[in-house]
């Protein structure tokens, strides 16, 4: 199978996805790495029907890679995840509207083009969580206790672009991060970026009751196959605070091999999220049969070009 991975500079030396690329290469598949942030790209030659079985995106929010993925999708090429689905979660304002429209539990959310507009939020809605609308990896996420604290944040937030403010959900200081590898679910706990003082060690945990059904709804709502969800257990039950396409999959056992198998399965036409009722107990819950690598004819490796690199034989992080 021949695959194209769009990898931006932020992830150039990151184990996810480079270890996945290395695994696919070791299994005999051809993987081209396209670096949209540092290469002049000839679109006609690169993106053409039949040149790759699937395209995979691992980029930062707002980076140039998504546009290339959308170009491939416009020609009817397979993308992992679906390009429109990625767009819907990369813009957190859009994601918040979609989530609430489909009845997913998400805090009340406000959109502000500039920090000064946040001052119109009524004082009785505080505390608030303020973050960039295209943020990722916990960048510039702040817990704001009251209106008087907004002024102190203005200088830091002014260059972050459009902002979101969400009502703060009281919690224990730890986040539940649930990963879906094409329907196979893995739950972890980690320290909340809003409570850095809490002594929480990132580790795997059993999936809490009801979380599998919630993940299935999220996957079906956004049309994602490889994704992660940040969930907070609040006084009124679980609340979704973020949805990410192609996350780090930290703490997922054999995560590299699982993600690589999922990429092959999806590229070969495997069904996506929501194809069956959730089942299983313990640390792994599946909402579809476990993935298996498919036997696919593999073309010979092509020579690297100035814009496309062959997968590295080894990677040292």
Image: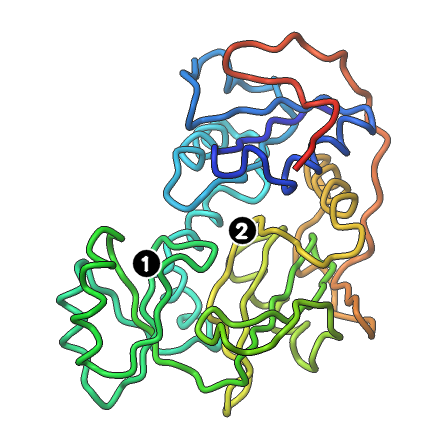
Residue indicated by mark 2: 245
**What residue is shown at x 40% (from left), y 78% (from top)?**
107
Q: Position of residue 79 (x, y in %)?
A: 57, 36
Tag 1 residue: 132
Element type at mark 2: strand
* Residue under the image location 68 percent in, 10 percent down: 302
Q: Are marks 1 and 2 in contact (CB under 8 Å)?
A: no
Q: Quadrant of the N terminus?
A: top right
Which numbered disc, 1 or 2, marks the residue closer to the eye? Answer: 1
In-image side of 283 versus 243 (left or right): right
Q: Residue placed at 73% from the left, 31% from the top?
A: 22
**Is 242 or 280 nearer to us in this picture?**
242
The answer to which quarter of the image holds residue 12 is top right
Relative to residue 175, is residue 211 drawn left or right? right
Q: Is residue 91 above or below residue 149?
A: above
Viewer-side residue, 258 vs 175: 175
Q: Measured from the top left, where is residue 204 in percent x and y?
A: 73, 68
Mark 1 / mark 2, whichever is N-terminal: 1
In-front residue for pair 9/208: 9
**Residue 86, percent from left and from top:** 48, 48
Residue 185, how many percent across, how many down? Answer: 71, 63
Disc 1, SS:
strand
């Amino acid at each position: 199978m021949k695959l194209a991975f769009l990898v931006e500079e932020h992830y150039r030396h990151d184990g996810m996805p480079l270890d996945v690329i290395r695994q696919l290469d070791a299994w005999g598949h051809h993987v081209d790495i396209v670096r949209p942030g540092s290469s002049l790209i000839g679109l006609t030659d690169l993106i053409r029907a039949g040149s790759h079985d699937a395209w995979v995106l691992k980029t930062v929010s707002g980076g140039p890679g998504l546009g290339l993925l959308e170009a491939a999708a416009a020609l009817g090429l397979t993308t992992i995840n679906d390009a429109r689905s990625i767009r819907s979660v990369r813009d957190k304002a859009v994601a918040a509207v979609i989530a609430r429209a489909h009845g997913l539990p998400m805090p009340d959310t406000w959109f502000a083009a500039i920090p000064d507009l946040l001052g119109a939020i009524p004082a009785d809605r505080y505390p608030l969580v303020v973050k960039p609308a295209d943020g990722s990896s916990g960048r510039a996420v702040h817990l704001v206790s009251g209106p008087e604290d907004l002024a102190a944040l203005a200088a830091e937030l002014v260059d972050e672009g459009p902002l979101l403010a969400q009502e703060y959900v009281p919690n224990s200081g730890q986040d539940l991060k649930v990963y879906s590898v094409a329907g196979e679910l893995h739950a972890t706990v980690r320290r909340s970026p809003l409570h850095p003082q809490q002594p929480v060690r990132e580790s795997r945990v059993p999936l809490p009751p009801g979380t599998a059904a919630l993940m299935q709804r999220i996957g079906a709502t956004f049309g994602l196959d490889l994704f992660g969800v940040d969930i907070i257990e609040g006084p009124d039950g679980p609340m979704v605070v973020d949805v990410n396409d192609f996350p780090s999959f930290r703490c997922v056992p054999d995560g590299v091999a699982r993600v690589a198998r999922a990429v092959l399965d999806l590229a070969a036409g495997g069904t996506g999220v929501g194809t069956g009722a959730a089942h299983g107990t313990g640390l792994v819950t599946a909402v579809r049969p476990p993935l298996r690598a498919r036997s696919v004819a593999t073309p010979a490796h092509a020579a690297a070009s100035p814009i496309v690199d062959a997968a590295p034989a080894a990677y040292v992080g």
